[in-house]
C-alpha cells in the first residue's frame, strides 16, 4: 500500500467513525426527539475547538460474536474543546453505537478523559446516553469510572448530563459529580428498572415515573437542572461553566456585567410584608441585589423551602443560600439541609464566596422528620458552613431563630460579616413562644391573659430580638438600610478577597452522612 493509499485509508476510517452507528440508527435517535452524540458535541463546545482523542479505539472482546462487531470509538466520543474560550474536557456516549454500552475500552476512554482533566486543571463534562454495562465483557468497567470521579472531586468541576438512558450501576458516576442535568421526558436514571420492580413488588410504573427528570428534580434530589430539550440542556451547561473556576486553585472568572456596584434597590423593602408571619418570595429579594437580576438556581424544585444558586456581584461569582418564606415558611427540613450542606461544600471547594439570606423560624417539627433523621441531616448543613474557608457573609432579612439560624451562618459558626436589616429578629425562639415560657406562671394568675401576653411579647421583641440588641453584643456587625444591601455586600467581598484561613491539620473531617 502506497503512502497516499494509507492516507486515504485514514480518511475512510475517520468518515466511518464520524457516522456513528449509521444512518438508520441516527434516524431512530432523531425520531425519539434526541440529538446524536456528534450534534450534541457541536452545540456544547465553541465551533472548531474540539480535539478528539481515541477515535480509532475498538473493544478487545472476542466472545459471543463480538469480534465481528468492533465499531471505531467504541461508543463514546472523548477529547477536549473550549466553552467561551475556556478549555474543557468532554466525554459523550453515542447511543447509536451498540446502545452506548460501556465495555472496558469505552470505560478506559472516559477514565483517561477525567484523569487528563484533573491533571490539566480544567472542568470535565460527561453527556450520558447508554443502555448500560456491556454484558459480553463482564463486570468492572463502571467501577474504574467511579474511581476517577472520586479522585477528581474537589479538584476540577465535574458536570454530568443524562440525555437519555442511565441505568444500573452506571447511575453512580453522575451521582459522584458536582452537577446533574436531565432532559424533560427524555432522560431516565434508576438502579432497577420498571420490569424488575414489577417482578419483585408487583407495582406497575413507567420509566419516566420511576427515574425521569420530574421525580429526580422534585423528590430524590439527584437532578440539579431540568432542560426542555437537548439544545436547552447544552445551553444551560455553558451557562453554568461561565460561573465556575477551572480548578480548585483558581478564582471564578470575573465578568463585566455592566451593573453599577453602588446601585441601590430603593423598592426592595416593599417585598417584605408588614405582618411578621406573612409569606413573600425570597427570589425577588435576591434578584434586586445581584448583577442584572440574574440568578442561576440549583435544584429549584427540590426542597423549595431552601434556595441555592449562583449569581454575580460586581462581576464576581457568589454562591447564595436563602430561606424561602413562601414555602413551609422557610423552615429547614431534612432535604433542605442536604441541599444547602452540599452546596456550601461545593462553593468552598471552588473558591466561591457564600452569602446567606436569612428568614428562618426553625426546623420543621414532626415525628416524620425526627424519624427521617433531621438531627443527622441538619448536622450536614452545620458541618458544611463551619468547614468552609471562603468569604462568608450573612444577611438577616427577618426571622433568625434558634438552632436553625446556626445552619444559616451566625458569627460563632465562622461568618465573616453579619448584616441585618432593621426588620430582623434574632432570638432563641419567636417572641410568642418565649413569652409563654418566661411568663408561664404569671399567665396562669392574671385575669386579662391576652393583654398581659401581648405586653410581654412586645417587651421581649423590643428588648431581646431587636437587631440593635444583636449589634450591642456584636452578634450583628452592621445594621443596614435594605436598599443598600447590594453595595454593602460588594464592599464586604472586596474587603475579604484575600482572606486566608487555615484549618487544623488532619487527613479529612468526618462529615455526617
Image (cartoon, rainbow, N blue to C red):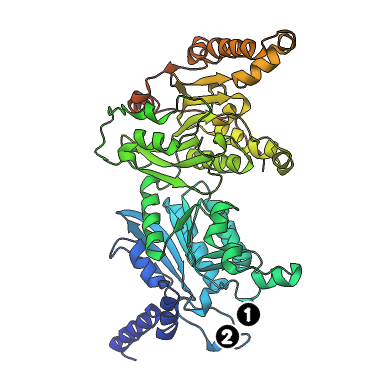
The one nearer the camera, 265 or 254, is 265
Q: Is residue 179 above or below residue 317?
A: below
Q: Pointer 1: what residue? A: 136
Q: Pointer 2: what residue? A: 66
Give me the residue at 61% from left, 34% from top: 383
Give me the residue at 74% from left, 39% from top: 367
Q: Residues within 10 Å of mark 2 (few under 14, many from 20)?
A: few
Q: Image check: 36 left or right of 165?
A: left
Alpha carbon of mark 2 to alpha carbon of mark 1: how far? 8 Å
The one nearer the camera, 129 or 431, is 431
Quick check: can you spot residue 202?
A: yes
| Rendered-image quadrant of the N terminus | bottom left
Q: Is residue 170 above or below residue 494?
A: below
The one nearer the camera, 164 or 347, is 164
| Rendered-image quadrant of the C terminus | top right
Quick check: can you spot residue 56?
A: no
Give me the residue at 63% from left, 64% from top: 169
What is the secondary structure assignment of the residue under circle 2? helix
- Whether residues under marks 2 and 1 lie with C-beta atoms below 8 angstroms apart, the answer is yes
Residue 369 location (% of width, % of height): 69, 40
What is the secondary structure assignment of the residue under circle 1? helix
Amino acid at each position: 500500500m502506497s503512502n497516499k493509499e494509507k492516507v486515504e485509508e485514514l480518511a475512510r476510517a475517520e468518515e466511518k467513525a464520524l457516522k456513528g452507528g449509521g444512518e438508520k440508527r441516527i434516524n431512530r435517535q432523531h425520531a425519539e426527539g434526541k440529538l446524536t452524540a456528534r450534534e450534541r458535541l457541536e452545540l456544547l463546545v465553541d465551533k472548531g475547538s474540539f480535539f478528539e482523542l481515541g477515535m480509532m479505539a475498538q473493544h478487545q472482546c472476542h466472545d459471543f460474536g463480538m469480534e465481528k462487531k468492533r465499531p471505531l470509538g467504541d461508543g463514546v466520543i472523548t477529547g477536549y474543546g473550549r466553552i467561551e474560550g475556556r478549555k474543557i474536557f468532554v466525554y459523550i456516549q453515542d447511543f447509536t453505537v451498540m446502545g452506548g454500552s460501556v465495555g472496558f475500552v469505552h470505560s478506559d476512554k472516559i477514565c483517561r478523559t477525567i484523569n487528563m482533566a484533573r491533571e490539566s486543571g480544567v472542568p470535565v463534562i460527561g453527556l450520558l446516553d447508554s443502555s448500560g454495562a456491556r454484558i459480553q465483557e463482564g463486570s468492572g468497567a463502571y467501577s474504574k469510572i467511579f474511581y476517577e470521579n472520586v479522585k477528581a472531586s474537589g479538584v476540577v468541576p465535574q458536570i454530568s448530563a443524562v440525555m437519555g438512558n442511565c441505568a444500573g450501576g452506571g447511575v453512580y458516576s453522575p451521582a459522584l459529580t458536582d452537577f446533574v442535568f436531565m432532559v424533560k421526558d427524555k432522560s431516565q436514571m434508576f438502579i432497577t428498572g420498571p420490569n424488575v420492580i414489577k417482578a419483585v413488588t408487583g407495582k406497575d410504573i413507567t420509566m419516566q415515573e420511576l427515574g425521569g427528570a420530574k421525580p429526580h428534580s422534585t423528590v430524590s434530589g439527584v437532578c440539579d437542572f431540568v432542560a426542555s430539550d437537548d439544545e436547552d440542556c447544552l445551553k444551560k451547561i455553558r451557562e453554568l461553566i461561565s460561573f465556575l473556576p477551572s480548578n480548585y486553585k483558581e478564582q471564578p472568572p470575573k465578568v463585566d456585567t455592566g451593573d453599577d456596584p453602588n446601585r441601590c434597590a430603593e423598592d426592595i423593602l416593599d417585598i417584605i410584608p408588614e405582618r411578621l408571619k406573612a409569606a413573600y418570595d425570597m427570589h425577588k429579594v435576591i434578584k434586586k441585589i445581584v448583577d442584572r437580576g440574574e440568578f442561576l438556581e440549583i435544584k429549584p424544585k427540590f426542597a423549595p423551602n431552601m434556595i441555592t444558586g449562583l449569581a454575580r456581584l460586581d462581576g464576581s461569582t457568589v454562591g447564595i443560600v436563602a430561606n424561602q418564606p413562601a414555602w413551609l415558611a422557610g423552615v429547614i427540613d431534612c432535604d433542605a439541609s442536604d441541599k444547602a450542606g452540599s452546596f456550601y461544600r461545593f462553593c468552598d471547594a471552588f473558591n466561591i464566596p457564600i452569602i446567606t439570606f436569612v428568614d428562618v423560624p426553625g426546623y420543621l417539627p414532626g415525628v416524620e422528620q425526627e424519624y427521617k433523621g433531621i438531627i443527622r441531616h441538619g448536622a450536614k448543613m452545620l458541618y458544611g458552613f463551619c468547614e468552609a474557608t471562603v468569604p462568608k457573609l450573612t444577611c438577616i432579612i427577618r426571622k433568625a431563630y434558634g438552632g436553625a439560624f446556626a445552619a444559616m451562618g451566625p458569627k460563632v459558626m465562622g461568618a465573616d460579616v453579619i448584616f441585618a436589616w432593621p426588620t430582623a429578629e434574632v432570638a432563641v425562639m419567636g417572641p410568642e413562644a418565649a413569652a409563654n415560657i418566661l411568663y408561664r406562671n404569671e399567665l396562669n394568675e392574671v385575669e386579662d391573659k391576652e393583654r398581659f401576653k401581648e405586653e410581654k411579647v412586645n417587651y421581649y421583641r423590643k428588648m431581646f430580638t431587636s437587631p440593635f440588641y444583636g449589634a450591642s453584643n456584636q452578634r450583628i456587625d452592621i445594621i443596614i438600610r435594605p436598599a443598600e444591601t447590594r453595595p454593602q455586600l460588594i464592599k464586604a467581598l472586596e474587603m475579604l478577597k484575600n482572606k486566608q484561613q487555615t484549618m487544623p491539620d488532619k487527613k479529612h473531617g468526618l462529615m455526617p452522612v
